[in-house]
Amino acid sequence: QLGAGTIKGVKASLSAAFNDAVRLGDLTRNPMKNVKMPDIQSKPTKPLPRKDWEKIYLEATKDPYMHARIEVAGMLALRPGEVLGLKWADLNAEECTLRVARQVQRIKGKGLVVKAVKQKKERTLLISDTTIQILLTHRRYQALQKAAWTEDMDLMFPNSLGKPQDEKADRNKFKRLLRAVGVPNYELYQLRKTAITALLSQTDLKTVMEYTGHTQISTVLGS
C-alpha cells in the first residue's frame, strides 16, 4: 500500500547503501541490480476544482488564523512543513516579501524538528498587499492568545502553546474546514498544486520555480 514515490525512494536508498558496501569490500556486487521494480504508476497531485477552492477560501475568511493559513498555501505554493516553519521575522511588510527559510517535520525518535527547507536553499517571495493584510490581521488576533502560551518562538502558525505545530494537527484543521463547506476530503498538499497551477497561468516558468523552490522545470510541471 505504498505510493510510487516511496517505493522508488526505498529502492534508491538501498541501492546507495549496497554500493557503499561494494566500495568498502563487504560485498562483491550490489544485489539491488537484480531487483525488478513492481508495476507502479505515479499519481500526480491534482489542484482543487475552482468551485470547491472558492468555497474553501470563503469559509476560511471567517477565521483570521485559517484565512492566513489557506492564503499562504493556496496562493504562494508553500509546502505544509514550510508553512509551519514560517516566523513573523520572515515577513517584510514594507518590501512586500516573505522569506521561506525552514520547515517543521516530525522525525522518529526526535519529535518535531525545525530544519532547513527541502532544497537546503531559502527563498524570498514577493507577496501582494492583500496577503500582507491577511497576515497582519492574523498576527493581531494571535497576540490575544499569547497569554496561554508557554513559549513564544515567533512562529506564524504555532500550536496552542506557541511551539511548533504538528503536521497532523494542521491537516485536521483543514479537514474541519472541508467538512464545514461540504466538499470532498481533499489533501492539504493539494493547495500547493492549486497555487502552482494558478501561477503557471499567470506568469513565467522562472518565477514559478522561484515560488516553489524547485530547480527542475519537469518537477514543477509534474508536482
Image (cartoon, rainbow, N blue to C red):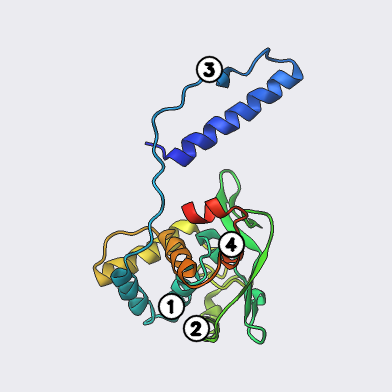
Q: Which of marks 4 and 3 is in front?
A: 4
* Kind of residue at badge 3: Asn
Specify few, some or many for label 3: CA neighbours under 10 Å numbering under 14, 14-19, or 20 or more.
few
Residue contact between numbered discs 4 and 1, judged by CB atoms under 8 Å: no
Q: How far apart are marks 1 and 3 (CA)?
A: 51 Å
Judge left or right: residue 211 versus residue 54: right
Q: Which of marks 2 and 1 is nearer the N terminus?
A: 1
Q: What element carries label 1?
A: helix
Q: Badge 2 is on which residue?
A: 134
- Give the residue type at disc 1: His
The disc, 1 or 3, on the residue closer to the chain's N-terminal end is 3
* Residue 223 appearing in the image: no
Asked if residue 189 lies left or right of residue 23, the reply is left
| Left or right, residue 179 beside residue 144 | left
Contact, mark 2 vs mark 1 (Cβ under 8 Å): yes
Vertical relation: 144 (above or below) 83: below
Check disc 3 and report its element: helix, strand or loop: helix
Pointer 3 residue: 34
The amino acid pointed to by label 4 is Met
Q: How far separated are the C-alphas under marks 3 and 2?
A: 55 Å
Depth order, front residue of 177/159: 177
Query: Distance from label 4 to label 3 (Cα)?
Result: 37 Å
The residue to which callout 4 is attached is 209
Q: Earlier in the sequence, mark 4 or mark 1?
A: 1
Q: In which quarter of the image is residue 151?
A: bottom right
Disc sitting over residue 67 in the figure: 1
Tell whether 172 sits left or right of 27: left
Q: In which quarter of the image is the N terminus?
A: top left
The tag earlier along the polypeptide, 3 or 2, is 3
